[in-house]
Image: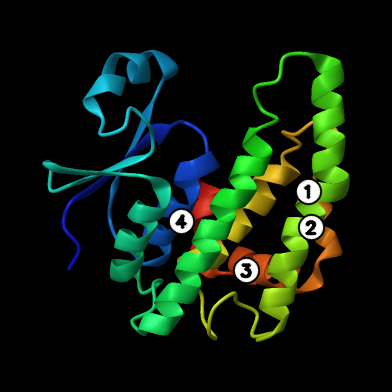
Amino acid sequence: MAPHLKVTYFNMKARAEPIRLALAIGDIPFEDERLTREQFAELKETYPFGQLPILTIDHKTVIAQQHAILRYVGRFAGLYPEDPIEQAKVDQFLGFAEDINFAVGKTLHTTDPTLKKSQREELSSKTLPKLFGYLERSASQTATGYLVGSKLTVADIVLYCFDGWLRMGVLDHVSPTILDGFPTLMKIVENVRGNEKVKAWNEAH
């Protein structure tokens, strides 16, 4: 049985959404704390690394970093494998997701519109296709409809959430449907989207 869990983030999907979805899929009750930017500014220095999301366990233990939290809740939810090799494979995909986030993140704080356009066009035409190509090749080797093994893991949820974030059109000059060009990855995304508990969460939020 899972302890009392509280997920703290902003009132948006982004980095907390894979955590929320993992808990929802696992039928694990949790407190969904959503802060305003002003509240975060007041509380920031009380958090382990001054960042969100965080997970508070039994009102006392605080865990930071999205993927550390995902591994923890994934064990309760049945979304993190017990087999050490499959664990390592999930971990490698989570690590690669951070590489993708880093590539995108470099373009988020550029204020010069001409430079940002150039950065985003390179991201869209070269960087992301190359990175997604690596993922496509790896996922195609098993072709189970999931990134690791033959059932849903937190790695698949991260991919699904990233695709959903792109489809919101948040990155100027990057096609929101860029993942459509990678059929194996899109099959995984559709498998997550078709999960009944994911549907229920999306309808409620």
* Nearest to N terminus: mark 1 or mark 4: 4
Q: Amino acid at mark 2?
A: Lys
Q: Position of residue 96 (x, y in %)?
A: 58, 58
The amino acid beneath tag 1 is Thr
Marked residue nearer the N-terminal end (2 or 3): 2
Q: Which residue is disc 3 drawn over?
A: 194
| Residue type beneath disc 4 | Leu
Identify the residue at image location x=41%, y=48%: 66
Q: Nearer the viewer, mark 2 or mark 3?
A: 2
| Residue 130's disc number | 2
Q: Which residue is mark 1?
A: 127
Which is nearer the N-term, disc 4 or disc 3?
4
Residues tagged 4 and 3 counted as in contact (Cβ below 8 A): no
Q: Nearer the viewer, mark 2 or mark 4?
A: 2
Q: CA distance from mark 2 to mark 4?
A: 28 Å
Please report the residue visible at 38 percent of the width from the left and 39 percent of the height from the top. Answer: 53
Disc 4, SS: helix
Say which amino acid is labelled 3. Gly
Q: At x 60% / y 44%, what residue is drawn?
A: 101
How many discs appear? Answer: 4
Quarter-wise, where is residue 137 in the image? bottom right
Q: Which mark is residue 21?
A: 4
CA neighbours of label 2 inside 10 A, class few (<14), some (14 to 19), many (20+): few
Q: CA distance from mark 1 to mark 4?
A: 28 Å
As drawn, 204 above or below 196: above
